[in-house]
Image: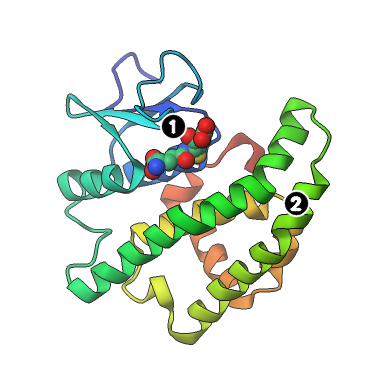
Amino acid sequence: MSNEMAQVRIFGPIISTYVRILEIVCEEADLTHEVIPTAAQAPQNRHPFGKVPVVEIDELELTETAPIARYIDTRHNGVSLQPADPSKRYAMDRWIATNDNYLFPLFEHGLVMPYIMHRHAGAPLDKERIGRALPNIARSLEFLELELAKDGAWTRAGFTLADIFLYVTLLGVRGTPEGAQGIAQCDALSAWMAVCDARPSITATRWEIERG
Ligand SMILES: N[C@@H](CCC(=O)N[C@@H](CS)C(=O)NCC(=O)O)C(=O)O
C-alpha cells in the first residue's frame, strides 16, 4: 500500500461482519479504504456504546454501519445501491433492519461467536449454546429462503445495500458446519449467495480465512 492515507479509515477487527460490510460499500464506491485493527473493548475505541466499527471519512467521524453505508453510497457512489422508489427503498431498509435487529444477533451469539472462540481463542466449543440457538437459526434460514423464493424479497430492486448486509451476515453462518449445512438446504439462498460470492467488491475484500 502507498504512504498516502486511505479515503476511508475503518476502526474495528480485521474479521468483523460490520467492518466487512463497509469495506464492500467502499469498493462499490471506488473509495480507498483501510482497516485499523481495533477491538470493541480497546480503550482507544471511540464508539459511545463500545461497538465496532468507527469510521473516518471526509474529515468526519461516524458510527453505526447502516447510516454510514447510506452516507458513502449517497455522497460517493451516486446513490447506486439505494433504490429511488419509496416502496423499494422501504424494502431495502426493512431487510437491513431485519438483519441488524434479529438475524445478526441470533446468528452471532448462537453460532458464529462460539466457533470463533473455539477456533481462535482455544475455548471449548459451547455446544449447549449452539444447540439452544439452532432451532431459531433454522427457522430464520427457512424464513429467508421462503421470502426469497416467493418474490425475490430484497433482490427485487437489483443489488442494494440490503444484499451486502445479508450476505456478510450469512457468510459468518456459512463458516460454521451447522450453518453451511443449513444454507446448503436452501436452494434460493445458496444461488443468491453464489452470485454475491463472485461480485468484484466482494472478492476484493475477502478475508484471509475465506481464501483457504
Ligand atoms: N449497531 C452497530 C453494531 C455493530 C456491531 O454489533 N458490531 C459487532 C462486531 S461485528 C461488535 O461491536 N461486537 C463487539 C461487542 O458487541 O462487544 C453498527 O451498526 O455498527
Q: Is residue 45 above or below residue 164?
A: above
Q: Secondary structure at mark 2?
A: helix
Residue at mark 1: 51
The span from disc 1 to disc 2 (Cα, nearest Å) is 23 Å
Task: Answer with the quarter of the image where residue 119 lies.
Answer: top right
Picture residue at 18% right of the left edge, 72% below the top: 86
Mark 1 or mark 2, earlier in chain: 1
Residue shown at the point (30%, 46%) measured from the top left:
69
Q: Residue 79: in sight, yes or no? A: yes
Q: Looking at the picture, how far across and down is residue 106, in whole percent?
A: 59, 54
Residue 199 appears anywhere in the view: no
Type of amino acid at the residue the image marks with label 1: Lys
The numbered dot on residue 130 is: 2
Would you say 129 lies left or right of 51 here? right
Q: Quadrant of residue 36?
A: top left
Compared to residue 52, the image places residue 112 above or below, namely below
Query: Which residue is pictured at 51% across the width and 51% down the height?
Result: 168
Q: Residue at x 54, y 50 (%)?
A: 105
Q: Residues within 10 Å of mark 2 (few under 14, many from 20)?
A: many
Q: In the rendered structure, which amino acid carries the disc numbered 2?
A: Ile
Instruction: Give residue 203's position: percent from left, percent from top.
Output: 50, 47
Q: In the rendering, which numbered label is found on residue 181?
A: none
Decide if residue 8 is on the left or right side of residue 59. Answer: right
Which quadrant: the C terminus? Answer: top right
Compared to residue 76, the image places residue 136 above or below, namely below
In this view of the protein, which residue sits in the foreground, 194 or 92?
A: 92
Q: Residue 24, image x and y in percent?
A: 40, 45
Going by the image, does 42 lie left or right of 26?
right
Circle 1: is it few (<14), some (14-19), or many (20+) Cα within 10 Å? Answer: some
Q: Position of residue 191 (x, y in %)?
A: 57, 71
Cβ of mark 1 under 8 A from ligand 1: yes
Q: Are marks 1 and 2 in contact (CB under 8 Å)?
A: no
